[in-house]
Amino acid sequence: MLIDKYGRRFTYLRISLIDRCNLRCRYCFPINAKFLPMENILTADEIIRLGRIFKDLGITKVRLTGGEPLVRKDFVDIVEGLHSIGFKLNITTNGILLGKYIEHLKGKVEYINISIDTFSPEKYAFITRSTTKFFYTVMENLERALNSGFKMVKINTVVLRGFNDDEIMDFVEFVKDRQVSLRFIEYMPFYGNEWSPHKFVSINEIKSRIEKKYRLEPVKGYSDVSVDFRIPGFKGLVGFIGSISSPFCRTCNRLRLTADGHLKPCLFSPFEKDLRRLLRGGARDEDIKEEIIKAVYNKPFGHPDVDALLSKARENRVMFAIGG
Ligand code: SAM
């Protein structure tokens, strides 16, 4: 039902529940990050109403993200509301508050992605601009999630040269005895996120470093964007998301809804459709559907190269405000 002018079909929606986060990751938050006024953040009822509308339009899979989705007080109500509509639900979280919610999520959430960029508590405190204490909490919650029967727990690791590229093999070896899907993610440029070509590590480089020691056998993994591999004798998978060096725009099936209710068809394009204005202006579901269909139809085909992304970065929202 949702199709763009290039014939791509959209079945996957990433909903940012809030732009606030309990961390300030350097690659995500500009130093002078400004948050949306709270009155602009969609209420749980508004999210669930939009959920129904998107379901009617053919969305089957929803990922809850942010900011940090778990800092929302009504997080459980939103999960229950969206689950009752019939979505396959997934969550991306930094894992700090996950322990509190694991029981609520069982049976409702299939995939949990936990972001961990380092195994060093000190480096964790540095990159997240927080404390070593959070590192231990996240690691504990990761192990709990792994033992809680979710379809798959994934680890998201953004690789930055000079920060954690020396830990690539530690990450790989971490999945040896754990049924977890590790994904190395290329560092993407956004306004004020300290991106530089010197810090960028391509997935090809990461892969060839791993291949010096291990044989990577291609497998069909658990994601549309990650290229996944099994290492003989390992329980977990190792995957690569090359948004910059190997963009997957041609097969893109995803849309984004920002915490303030803007539909964002493409991560790197500043184009947005304000659905909150429609919701709060008394629009009927049918009118909102029509606007969504039009916005999706006009989704840009792909994103430009890094230089163009950097020069236009100011026009786009930054990652925490889009919903990664
Ligand atoms: N707070 C949650 C978390 O930490 O997972 C969800 C939001 S966060 C924006 C979602 C994902 O985006 C995280 O895995 C994070 O590592 C990733 N991310 C943020 N900024 C990024 C960047 N510049 N390049 C690549 N990935 C980025």
Image: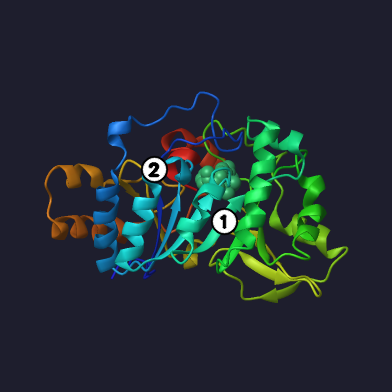
Crowdedness of circle 2 by 10 Å Cα count: few (<14), some, many (20+)? some
Indicate the colouring scheme: rainbow
Q: Which amino acid, mark 2? A: Pro
Q: Position of residue 230 (x, y in %)?
A: 73, 72
Name the residue located 25 percent from the left edge and 49 percent from the top edge: 45
Q: Which amino acid, mark 1? A: Asn
Which quarter of the figure is the N terminus placed in?
bottom left
Q: Name above or below for residue 97 compared with residue 315.
A: below
Q: Which mark is residue 39?
A: none
Residue 167 appears left or right of 86: right
Q: Does label 1 point to a residue whose CB lies under 8 Å from ligand 1?
A: yes
The residue that mark 2 highlights is: 270
Q: Quadrant of residue 27?
A: top right
The residue that mark 1 highlights is: 113
Q: Position of residue 227 (x, y in %)?
A: 63, 67
Q: Position of residue 112 (x, y in %)?
A: 54, 58
Q: Is residue 264 visible?
A: no
Mark 2 or mark 1: whose residue is earlier in sequence: 1
